[in-house]
Amino acid sequence: MKIDLNCDMGESFGQYHLGDDAAMLDIITSANIACGLHAGGPLVMRETVTNAARRGVAIGAHPAYPDLQGFGRRAMQLSSAELEAFLIYQLGALAGFAQTAGTRLEHVKPHGALYNQAVSDPDIAAAIARAVAVFDPTLIVVTLPESALRLAALGIGLRVALEGFADRAYLNNGTLAPRSLRGAVIHDPGVAAARAIRMVVQGEVETLEGTVIPLRVNTICVHGDTPGATQIAAHLREVLEKAQITLAPLNEVLKG
Amino acid sequence: MKIDLNCDMGESFGQYHLGDDAAMLDIITSANIACGLHAGGPLVMRETVTNAARRGVAIGAHPAYPDLQGFGRRAMQLSSAELEAFLIYQLGALAGFAQTAGTRLEHVKPHGALYNQAVSDPDIAAAIARAVAVFDPTLIVVTLPESALRLAALGIGLRVALEGFADRAYLNNGTLAPRSLRGAVIHDPGVAAARAIRMVVQGEVETLEGTVIPLRVNTICVHGDTPGATQIAAHLREVLEKAQITLAPLNEVLKG
Amino acid sequence: MKIDLNCDMGESFGQYHLGDDAAMLDIITSANIACGLHAGGPLVMRETVTNAARRGVAIGAHPAYPDLQGFGRRAMQLSSAELEAFLIYQLGALAGFAQTAGTRLEHVKPHGALYNQAVSDPDIAAAIARAVAVFDPTLIVVTLPESALRLAALGIGLRVALEGFADRAYLNNGTLAPRSLRGAVIHDPGVAAARAIRMVVQGEVETLEGTVIPLRVNTICVHGDTPGATQIAAHLREVLEKAQITLAPLNEVLKG
Amino acid sequence: MKIDLNCDMGESFGQYHLGDDAAMLDIITSANIACGLHAGGPLVMRETVTNAARRGVAIGAHPAYPDLQGFGRRAMQLSSAELEAFLIYQLGALAGFAQTAGTRLEHVKPHGALYNQAVSDPDIAAAIARAVAVFDPTLIVVTLPESALRLAALGIGLRVALEGFADRAYLNNGTLAPRSLRGAVIHDPGVAAARAIRMVVQGEVETLEGTVIPLRVNTICVHGDTPGATQIAAHLREVLEKAQITLAPLNEVLKG
């Protein structure tokens, strides 16, 4: 049994530092690297790509709406053509640093508002899928199991990695419980780790409503910018390894 | 005898339009395309790359300081590491659009303040040369014959194309006369065209002081954003062709 | 009978020029000046404020979403607190230039997506009204007759100026016909001028569907960035003056 | 004997937090608030102004070059007219929040590269002084005792507050020792506090070279973004109070 651990990183900006990327790179198998439009920037991108490559962590793009002040979390209304172009721009910029570091991009995971909208909005999902396909059809798209992006990416011939959240509650329909709901975020690392194992081994999760639903995932997201983030991630990795689950980048996980 | 005609383009931004890129693409052989930091942006970049590729015009990057408001014309103090990363970012972003359009970058010509500083500042020249070499050592660097960037690029093993300005006066030391000097800009298209032919055929130019100095160039810059720009450029092309000078992209010109 | 003529201006940005503000200032009575977030910027704001003050044109703020690339025309999802703060920021910045020029702000007209959303979205309308009221309750809010912003501004005790568009078609419900509809934009300056007079004198307009509906307006918007904009505006002014309608800034128009 | 304690604040940006402004406001007497161009932004400015007003801390503008990524620490080449306009823009924006909170600006302290350049560059100093004078001639300008800005501000009729740094070493010519020099930063809070008292009481400081030079200051800068910043500032305040020195905002200090 194999699972990928992914983390958003390279989200520092100028004078502002966010997350302990160096520590996290020792734990995860895939890094989603900000491309300068919601966070990051050329210098941060270069350092993060170089560090990830050095540790053998798979490098992916974490593209977003062009909105530094809103950290890519504010929905913006772009035309499909504009969105597609913004994605190619970000993929190209990050791929340039990968090329410079002697490596290549493996996957794409949209950030923030774009990630959320791609779950439910077929036009946005289609624009993302088109951008990835036209830029590099070998890239893996990371999204939720129940999402418009999954369908759009598969429809255009891309590989898709399904993402699970060990520390977030699910609803019966397989979507994430909004953070505003009581119990939406699981703070106990032990509970989160147990949920991760259940996702990977049994392919299921217990929802906020108390039902057990199927949930097959290829990668589990660990957060880099919360207090104790690296301890929680390290604990999760340890528990997964004790359960004889192999941690591997998406490329290997998808091969089965 | 061969010469390249290059023009900066893709410098529109959002609602703002600059230059008649479509008309200019029928005249020139090399397009220096803005990478979104001083002008342009994803949608403009994609359209410009696509149009250039369709007409067989060679595509080059026109990277700049990150300064939309100053149009990349304000000198900014970046560290060498920062500058290098900003250049790779821009090269990568534009290369992404080239890849998407089924083509590739051929050259790099720094923009505005960066172009000027690269002529006289060895540290900035070295940072540019390193960025190009590490990103793609087959790219041609466009700069002035008398410049720190020429030396830095040659020193690191890059090919260099020397740029001449038919409509700008030169000083005896081979540098461009500052625009503030009387006679620094040549407004008569006929005079400019004659100067271009003299540069290409005789490899010389008459300076503002009245001396004839050697000036060997591989490419002549035509301006896209001045009144009557396309008429002037078309006239130049016609005059060059009548003089039996072959217009060809840099790659061919450098082969001799 | 009195009417105000207003025009959006100061929308140049850095190297990019938009509209012939100097010519328009001889025609209009109220200038809505961009505040640097969708267009404009400190230097443009200062020049525009100074020029407007010199010609006796009333100065108003034209605040927008923070989105230069989208020219403030892309809807953005800001919290109410964020939107309120962004508006105060823009009002303050423009008021600073007014103060510097020895004058003051008279009105506020939201720009682009914000203008449109304020018509139909009560939360956005309330945030705008609160921002204006807390910054300077003597400012006049410019909006459509049928709009949430009108209600919100009146509710909080602000003066409201109702805006009409001589060159745009109306629907039976009093809203502007979307530009995508055939006939939504009136291109004939004579027809537009006649419609303006009918709005001012009879307080009515013929809709796209052919019905005559009441439409009382205090100000008519003239566009500054379309071909022939100043000729059209000058013609409108001439026709209004011939019809014995007094052109006056909002402050006077609202006094009756 | 009176002294002001000032601190740069409001330098968080979007998702990024910098400094413990709430704690610092209990210690200092003057807050230099970022105006959104190097850090901060509308929401942060509003909160910081409101909090400062509530605690009776004097509010001042902390204007900078427009450079979020460089945190205003990269020198930029702006024309005098441009720089003047950028300063008025920032003063106006912050004054808008002060007005909204029922208070007003008391002082201006340039940030980062602008602060440093204003010490040695008379043109930049003059542009800053003109901007302040034309915006509001009652504002106090904060700068180093030996600085071009001091002369420019006094020359144009502005009040000037001289700033000292308790935790930075001085050279014999009265300027700050560059951070690159060994001993340039004083890390021991006790030593820094003793130096502060000596500046206030005796009007002198011992330089890095070991000489005692006169140094008369009206305000001492405490840093908000270094580890242990609030503890160090609180200690300094306590020591000053024990030495019977009254802490008061600049307005009172300058009255003597």
Image (cartoon, coloured by chain):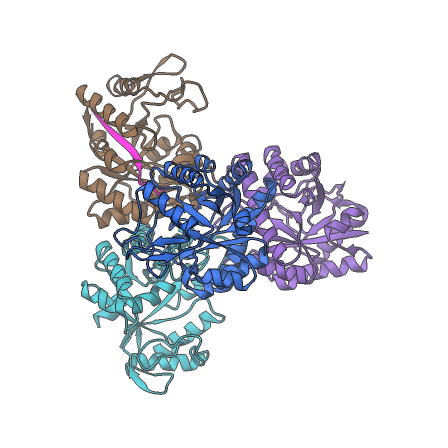
Chain colours: A blue, B purple, C cyan, D brown
Residue D62 lies, in percent from the top left, at 33, 39
Q: Is residue A19 visible?
A: no
Q: Quadrant of residue C158?
A: bottom left
Q: Is residue A96 magenta?
A: no
Residue at x-position 36% and y-position 81%: C195
Q: Nearer the viewer, residue A183 or D102?
A: A183
Q: Is residue B74 above or below residue C46?
A: above
Residue D23 lies, in percent from the top left, at 24, 34
Q: Is residue A239 above or below residue A70?
A: above
Q: Nearer the viewer, residue C143 or B101?
A: B101
Q: Quadrant of residue B144?
A: top right
- Left or right: D201, with D119 as reference point: left
Q: Is residue C84 visible?
A: yes
Q: Quadrant of residue A117?
A: bottom left
- Left or right: D234, with C178 as reference point: left
- Left or right: B169, with D123 as reference point: right
Total numbered badges shown on the rendered structure: 0
Residue C89 lies, in percent from the top left, at 31, 51
Residue C254 lies, in percent from the top left, at 23, 70
Q: Nearer the viewer, residue A54 or C235?
A: A54
Q: Is residue D167 above or below residue C61?
A: above
Q: Which residues are magenta?
A: D2-16
Residue at x-position 73% and y-position 43%: B210
Q: Residue furthest bottom?
A: C210
